Image (cartoon, rainbow, N blue to C red):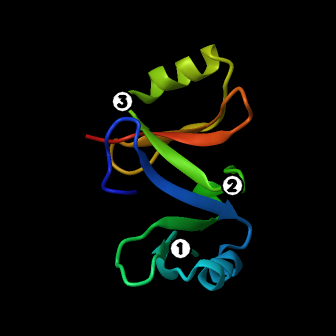
C-alpha cells in the first residue's frame, strides 16, 4: 500500500487475474513498468514499478488464494476512517458489498463494494 493514509485518499491500485505473470509482461511492454515479486507462499504476485523509481505504482495479482474472489478490474483502495460504518453507508445508499471485510496486515482491513452505478472499488481501513 501507498504511504498515503489520509481519509478519502487512494492508497493502492491492483489487478487480480488468472495469469498475473502473463499480464505483468503485457504491462511491462505497454507502459514500461518494471516489476518486483511479492511472495504469496507457493506463488508470487507482482508490484509494478515505473521506470527510474523504486516505488511501486500498482500490483498485479493472481486470482487465487486471498485474491480468489476479487474481480478482474483495476481496483482502487480508498482509505476510510471506519470500515464497518462505511459498509453500512454503502448498503444504505444502494451499493453492495461484494467481498469482505477481510484482514490486510496488522489491524488493517478492506472490503470490495459496487456503487449504485455499478462501479467497483475497495474501501480500506488502515491499522493503528
Image location (x, y in percent) of residue 55: 36, 72
Please tell me the numbered disc located at residue 73.
2
- In this picture, residue 23 sits left or right of residue 122: right
Quadrant of the snapshot with the N terminus: bottom left
Which is more toward the observer, 30 or 73? Answer: 30
Disc 1 target residue: 46
Q: Give me the residue at 60% from left, 42% from top.
A: 121
Front residue of 112 and 67: 112
- Image location (x, y in percent) of residue 69: 69, 49
Report the residue at 50% width, 65% height from top. Answer: 58
Q: CA distance from mark 2 to mark 3?
A: 24 Å
Q: Quadrant of residue 64?
A: bottom right
Q: Earlier in the sequence, mark 3 or mark 1?
A: 1
Q: For mark 3, what is the residue? A: 81
Which mark is on residue 116?
A: none
Residue 40 placement, left or right of 65:
left
Amino acid at each position: 500500500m501507498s504511504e498515503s493514509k489520509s481519509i478519502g485518499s487512494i492508497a493502492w491500485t491492483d489487478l487480480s487475474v488468472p495469469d498475473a505473470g502473463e499480464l505483468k509482461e503485457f504491462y511491462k511492454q505497454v507502459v514500461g513498468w518494471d516489476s518486483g515479486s511479492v511472495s504469496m507462499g507457493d506463488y508470487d504476485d507482482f508490484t509494478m514499478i515505473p521506470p527510474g523509481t523504486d516505488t511501486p505504482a500498482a500490483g498485479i495479482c493472481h486470482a487465487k488464494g486471498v485474491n480468489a474472489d476479487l474481480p478482474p478490474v483495476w481496483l482502487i483502495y480508498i482509505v476510510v476512517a471506519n470500515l464497518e460504518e462505511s459498509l453500512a453507508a454503502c448498503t444504505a445508499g444502494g451499493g453492495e458489498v461484494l467481498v469482505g471485510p477481510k484482514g490486510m496486515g496488522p489491524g488493517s482491513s478492506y472490503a470490495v463494494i459496487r456503487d449504485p452505478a455499478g462501479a467497483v472499488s475497495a474501501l480500506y481501513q488502515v491499522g493503528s
